[in-house]
């Protein structure tokens, strides 16, 4: 009997789905007075979407810089550990083996990542501390300039012409020595090339969209995609910057981003970095939403791809667009697992 589409989705997702960028620690920190946030607000969607690994990103908002930066970063990690301990559904993982064990025992794995090295200050010793706490992927910058380098702006040009600082290069060297994945999301174009020229491990871009569809420096160009492909890296496709136009911010256009990367470098370079942000955005007062629009851009959320339970819509659309099982499984988890196996 022919397998139904729903059964096929079920089978393809059963092995797990990996999202390499989620602002979870930041939200847990903001809700630090509450209990069981993870189990009540996130677990149902993770389970409905067959999530197996989440890249849980430490990110420090401007308002905490510079004095409270380190403390907030540590508190974000503390909340993740405390919330993880309240349920046997989760595990914070530091190695590929631990990720495998989490899957075998039916747990959702968190891989702690850092988006912008502001918490390190200019002290490489702090990197060692965060490594011991479980940080296993680091992107040097968010959109701003820090001690390591410069972020790409939310415009077609205008970011710093300089690349990394000496500290930025030291951080990368230490990441490679310790076994921390180097993430190129957000870095400015000069810094992007410099990172590739001085590292040897497979690079990732945890969450990004394509300049070919949304031409801002925060996204990546076809040239940059090819550079990642040549180094056997993986690019996680972001769900909130697929188009500058709201009406083009659709699931189909999300799949266009996937298709374009696959055409440029092959399917082995495509992963998921949803960057689901709708749930945080909705919690913000209007003034803060406006501030985001002024500072960066107005995010256009894809209506049927705004949280982890919506994974199934993506898998269904990949099937409808003619992707085969092997390729879909690489996108959903296989390519990220290869990176974890090689680096962690
Ligand atoms: Zn980001």
Image (cartoon, grey):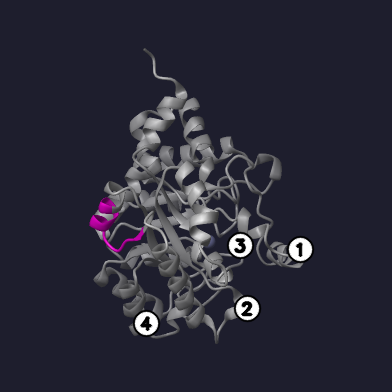
Q: CA distance from mark 4 to mark 2?
A: 21 Å
Is label 1 or label 3 in front? 1
Q: Residues within 10 Å of mark 1 (few under 14, many from 20)?
A: few
Mark with earlier residue (2, 3): 2
Residue 234 lies in the magenta-colored region: no
Residue that carries the numbered disc 2 in the rendered image? 63
Q: Answer with mark 3 or mark 4, whichever residue precedes in sequence.
A: 4
Is 126 above or below relative to 114?
below
The boundaries of the magenta stretch are 91-101
**Mark 2 secondary-structure assignment:** helix
When the figure is inspected, residue 57 is found, relative to residue 242, above or below; the finding is below
Q: Could you tell whether 66 is left or right of 167 in the image?
A: right
Query: What residue is rendered at 66% in x and 40% in y?
Result: 248
- Check whether the beta carbons of the residues at disc 2 and disc 3 lie within 8 A of each other: no
Residue at x-position 27% and y-position 66%: 179
Residue beneath label 3, please?
A: 157
- Reading the image, the residue beneath label 4 is 126
Q: Tell me if I can see residue 275 in this picture.
A: no
In this view, the residue in front, 208 or 292, is 292
Check disc 1 and report its element: helix, strand or loop. Answer: helix
Assign a secondary structure to mark 3. Answer: loop
* Whether residue 218 can be seen here: yes
**97 within the magenta span:** yes
Compare marks 4 and 1 and give the one earlier in the sequence.
4
User: Which circle, 4 or 1, is nearer the viewer?
Assistant: 1
Q: Which mark is residue 286?
A: 1
Is disc 3's CB within 8 Å of ligand 1? Answer: no
Q: CA distance from mark 2 to mark 1?
A: 17 Å
Q: Mark 2 or mark 1: name the one nearer the start of the chain.
A: 2
Distance Cα–Cα, label 4 vs label 1: 36 Å
Please tell me whether mark 2 or mark 3 is closer to you in this view: 2
Query: Residue, x 65% and y 54% (percent of image)?
Result: 299
């Amino acid at each position: 009997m022919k397998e139904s589409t729903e059964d096929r989705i079920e089978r393809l997702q059963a092995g797990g789905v990996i999202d390499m960028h989620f602002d979870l620690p930041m939200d847990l920190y903001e809700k630090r007075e509450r209990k069981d946030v993870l189990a009540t607000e996130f677990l149902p969607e993770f389970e409905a979407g067959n999530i197996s690994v989440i890249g849980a990103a430490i990110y420090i908002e401007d308002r905490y810089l510079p004095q409270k930066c380190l403390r907030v970063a540590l508190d974000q990690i503390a909340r993740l550990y405390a919330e993880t301990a309240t349920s046997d559904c989760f595990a914070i993982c530091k190695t590929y083996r631990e990720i495998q064990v989490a899957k075998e025992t039916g747990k959702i794995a968190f891989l702690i990542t850092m988006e912008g090295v502001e918490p390190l200050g200019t002290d490489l010793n702090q990197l060692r501390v965060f490594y011991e706490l479980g940080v296993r992927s680091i992107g040097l910058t968010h959109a701003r300039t820090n001690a390591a380098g410069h972020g790409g702006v939310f415009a077609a040009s205008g970011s710093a012409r300089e690349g990394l600082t000496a500290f930025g290069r030291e951080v990368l060297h230490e990441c490679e020595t310790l076994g921390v994945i180097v993430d190129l999301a957000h870095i400015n174009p000069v810094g992007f090339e410099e990172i590739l020229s001085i590292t040897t491990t497979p690079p990732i871009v945890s969450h990004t969209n394509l300049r070919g569809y949304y031409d801002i420096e925060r996204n990546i160009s076809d040239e940059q995609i090819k550079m990642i492909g040549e180094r056997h890296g993986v690019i996680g496709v972001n769900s909130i910057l697929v188009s500058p136009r709201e009406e083009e911010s659709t699931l189909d256009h999300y799949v266009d981003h996937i298709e374009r990367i696959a055409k440029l470098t092959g399917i082995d370079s495509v992963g998921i970095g949803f960057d689901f942000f709708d749930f945080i955005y909705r919690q913000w007062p209007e003034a803060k939403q406006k501030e985001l629009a002024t500072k960066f851009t107005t995010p256009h959320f894809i209506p049927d791809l705004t949280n982890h339970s919506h994974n199934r819509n993506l898998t269904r659309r990949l099937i409808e667009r003619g992707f085969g099982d092997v390729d879909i499984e690489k996108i959903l988890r296989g390519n990220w697992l290869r990176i974890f196996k090689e680096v962690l």
